[in-house]
Image (cartoon, grey):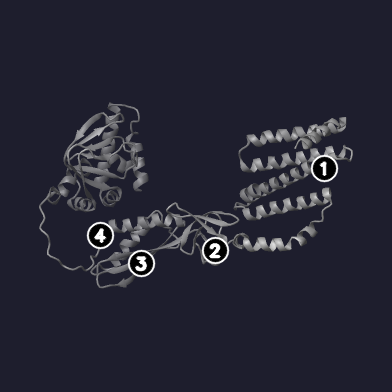
C-alpha cells in the first residue's frame, strides 16, 4: 500500500508544466462535479453528474499517462484508469436505468441485467489488466480450471438455478415490480426481483421470499395484466318470496353507488341458484386494482345490507333445529323505544314515522361501563350517538370536564356529517346505553328525507352561531363551509 502511494506522489513530482495544467483542469472539473453530485438528490441528475465525474477522472489519468515516461509508474496509472473506467460504466448503467427507462420509458429497470452487465465489464477489465500487466493468457486459465468449475457448479446448483431462472423471468417479463400476482398458494404485490429471490408483500403486509427456480416451476397468475382492473364476484342471499326483479334492481343500485366499482365493463347481477332456504344472486364487477378489491367487496356487501333494509327485503335465515327457548329476564334494552329516542334528537325532529323506523332498524345499541372511553379527541369517526340511559362526561384537551350529557342528548354528530376529527373526549360516568347511528344508515334515510336535509342546515347554523359567540382556537368553519364538507361526503 505504501509503495502504491509513493508511486502516486512520484508521478506528480515528474509532471511537466503543460501536463500539470491539463490534469489540474480535469481534476477541478471532477471536484466540481463531485460537489454537485452531493448537492443534487434527484436520482437522474445524480447519475448524470456521476458519469461526467468519472469520465473527467479517467481523462485526467490518461492525460497524465501520455506525458509520463514509460516506466514502473505506468502500472499505477493503468490500475487507476481501469477503476475509473469501470465506475464510469456503472454510472452509465445508472443513467440508462433512471433517466432513459425511469423518466422517458416510465418502466422499471431490469436489475439482474444491469448487474450482469456490470459484472461482465468488471471481468473484461480484469482479463485485459492481467494480459497487459502480467502477460497472463486468460483462456488457458479457464481451460485448466474446468474441473474446479464443475465441482463449484455442482455444489451451487440451486443457487445457479435461481440465478438463471431470474434471468429468464426478466427476459420473458411475466410480471414487473408493482404487479399483484399469485404463485402457487402465495399471493401479493411484487416489490423486488433479485438474483435469487422474488419478494412479495401480501395484503396482510407480510413479506414472502420465493426462490426464482420455484417461480419458474409454479403456475403464475398476474392480476395486473393485461389490465390493472380486477374482476370481483360477490354472492348475496335473498328470501324466496322476494321477486327477482325487485332484488336485482336493489343490487344494481348498490353497484351504481359504490365508489370503488368501475362503471365499465357494466356490473352485472344474476340469479345464480334457487336453494331450499334462499335465492343466491351473483354480483360481478371490476375494481381499478387488485389492492382495491377487498375494500370494494366490503363496500358492496355493506351497501346491499342497507339497501335491503330500505327496500324491506329480509335476509333469509338458514333452517335450524328448533329448541325450547330459555327464559330471560327483561332488560332496559328490550324495553327501549328506539323510534321515540330518535325522534327526540334535534337532528331528526319532524321526520315521518316510517323514516324514523328505518333509521332505528339500521342503528345499533351500545352499552358502556363506567369510565369507559366512548369517543377520544382527534379520532376520525363516522358515527353519532344518542344517549338512552346513563350519563357521560365531556372533557377538553387538558382533561378538564366541560359538560355532562344525559338521556336524549346527542354527541359525535359533527364527525358523521363533516368527516372532521372528534373535538372532545367522551367518557361514561354511569353504565351508559347509547344508540349508535353510522354514516351509511344516515345516507340511506337522507336520500328520501327533505326534512333531514333541512335539519342538517339548521344544525350547522346553530354550531356556527355558538362559535361566533364564544370564539376559540380551532373553531369550526362557517355554516356554508361545513355544508360543503357535508356535500363531499354524501353526494
Q: Do the residues bearing badges 4 and 2 touch, measured as CB atoms within 8 Å?
A: no
Residue shown at 69% from the left, 35% from the top:
34
CA gap, disc 1 to disc 4?
Answer: 89 Å
Q: Which mark is residue 214?
A: 2
> Which SS class for mark 2?
helix
Mark 3 closeness class: few <14, some 14–19, many ≥20 residues within 10 Å: some
**463 or 434, nearer to the observer:** 434
Residue 233 versus residue 361 in the image, above or below? below
**Is residue 284 among what the camera can see?**
yes
Disc on the earlier residue, 2 or 1: 1
Asked whether, in this view, residue 79 is left or right of residue 283, the answer is right
**72 or 409, nearer to the observer:** 72
CA gap, disc 3 to disc 4?
Answer: 19 Å
CA gap, disc 2 to disc 1?
Answer: 47 Å
Disc on the earlier residue, 3 or 2: 2
Q: Label 1: which residue?
A: 75
Q: Do the residues bearing badges 1 and 4 touch, measured as CB atoms within 8 Å?
A: no
Mark 2 closeness class: few <14, some 14–19, many ≥20 residues within 10 Å: some
Asked whether, in this view, residue 325 is left or right of residue 411, the answer is left
Mark toward the viewer: 1 or 3: 1
Q: Position of residue 297 (x, y in %)?
A: 37, 58
Mark 1 closeness class: few <14, some 14–19, many ≥20 residues within 10 Å: some
Residue 243 versus residue 432 in the image, above or below? below
Q: Label 3: which residue?
A: 282
Q: Label 4: which residue?
A: 311
Asked whether, in this view, residue 198 is left or right of residue 476, the answer is right
Q: Position of residue 88 (x, y in %)?
A: 72, 44
Q: Position of residue 257 (x, y in %)?
A: 36, 55
> Which SS class for mark 3?
strand
Disc on the earlier residue, 3 or 4: 3
Mark toward the viewer: 1 or 4: 1
Amino acid at each position: 500500500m505504501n509503495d502504491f502511494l509513493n508511486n502516486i506522489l512520484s508521478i506528480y513530482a515528474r509532471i511537466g508544466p503543460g501536463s500539470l495544467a491539463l490534469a489540474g483542469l480535469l481534476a477541478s472539473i471532477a471536484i466540481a462535479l463531485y460537489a454537485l453530485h452531493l448537492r443534487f438528490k434527484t436520482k437522474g441528475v445524480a447519475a448524470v453528474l456521476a458519469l461526467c465525474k468519472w469520465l473527467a477522472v479517467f481523462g485526467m489519468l490518461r492525460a497524465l499517462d501520455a506525458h509520463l515516461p514509460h516506466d514502473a509508474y505506468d502500472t499505477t496509472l493503468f490500475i487507476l484508469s481501469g477503476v475509473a473506467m469501470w465506475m464510469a460504466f456503472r454510472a452509465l448503467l445508472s443513467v440508462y436505468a433512471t433517466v432513459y427507462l425511469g423518466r422517458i420509458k416510465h418502466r422499471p429497470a431490469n436489475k439482474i441485467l444491469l448487474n450482469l452487465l456490470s459484472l461482465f465489464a468488471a471481468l473484461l477489465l480484469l482479463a485485459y489488466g492481467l494480459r497487459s500487466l502480467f502477460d497472463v493468457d486468460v483462456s488457458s486459465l479457464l481451460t485448466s480450471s474446468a474441473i474446479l468449475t464443475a465441482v463449484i457448479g455442482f455444489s451451487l446448483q440451486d443457487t445457479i438455478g435461481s440465478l438463471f431462472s431470474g434471468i429468464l423471468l426478466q427476459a420473458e417479463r411475466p410480471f414487473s415490480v408493482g404487479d399483484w400476482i399469485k404463485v402457487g398458494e402465495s399471493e401479493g404485490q411484487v416489490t423486488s426481483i433479485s438474483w435469487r429471490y422474488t419478494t412479495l408483500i401480501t395484503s396482510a403486509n407480510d413479506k414472502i421470499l420465493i426462490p426464482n427456480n420455484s417461480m419458474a416451476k409454479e403456475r403464475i397468475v398476474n392480476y395486473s395484466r393485461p389490465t390493472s382492473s380486477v374482476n370481483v364476484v360477490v354472492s348475496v342471499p335473498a328470501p324466496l318470496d322476494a321477486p327477482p326483479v325487485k332484488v336485482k334492481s336493489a343490487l344494481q343500485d348498490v353497484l351504481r353507488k359504490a365508489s370503488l366499482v368501475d362503471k365499465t365493463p357494466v356490473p352485472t347481477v344474476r340469479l345464480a341458484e334457487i336453494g331450499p332456504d334462499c335465492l343466491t344472486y351473483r354480483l360481478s364487477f371490476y375494481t381499478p386494482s387488485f389492492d382495491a378489491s377487498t375494500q370494494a367487496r366490503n363496500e358492496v356487501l355493506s351497501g346491499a345490507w342497507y339497501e335491503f333494509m330500505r327496500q324491506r327485503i329480509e335476509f333469509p335465515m338458514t333452517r335450524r333445529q328448533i329448541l325450547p327457548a330459555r327464559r330471560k329476564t327483561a332488560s332496559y334494552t328490550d324495553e327501549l323505544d328506539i323510534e321515540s329516542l330518535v325522534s327526540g334528537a334535534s337532528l331528526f325532529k319532524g321526520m315521518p314515522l316510517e323514516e324514523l323506523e328505518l333509521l332505528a332498524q339500521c342503528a345499533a345499541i351500545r352499552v358502556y361501563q363506567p369510565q369507559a372511553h366512548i369517543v377520544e379527541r382527534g379520532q376520525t369517526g363516522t358515527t353519532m350517538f344518542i344517549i338512552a340511559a346513563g350519563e357521560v362526561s365531556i372533557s377538553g384537551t387538558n382533561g378538564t370536564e366541560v359538560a355532562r350529557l344525559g338521556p336524549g342528548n346527542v354527541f359525535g354528530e359533527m364527525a358523521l356529517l363533516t368527516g372532521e376529527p372528534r373535538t372532545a373526549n367522551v367518557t361514561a360516568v354511569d353504565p351508559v346505553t347509547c344508540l349508535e347511528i353510522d354514516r351509511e344508515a344516515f345516507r340511506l334515510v337522507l336520500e328520501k328525507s327533505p326534512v333531514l336535509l333541512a335539519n342538517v342546515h339548521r344544525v350547522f347554523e346553530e354550531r356556527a352561531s355558538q362559535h361566533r359567540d364564544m370564539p376559540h382556537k380551532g373553531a369550526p368553519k362557517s355554516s356554508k363551509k361545513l355544508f360543503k364538507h357535508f356535500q363531499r361526503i354524501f353526494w
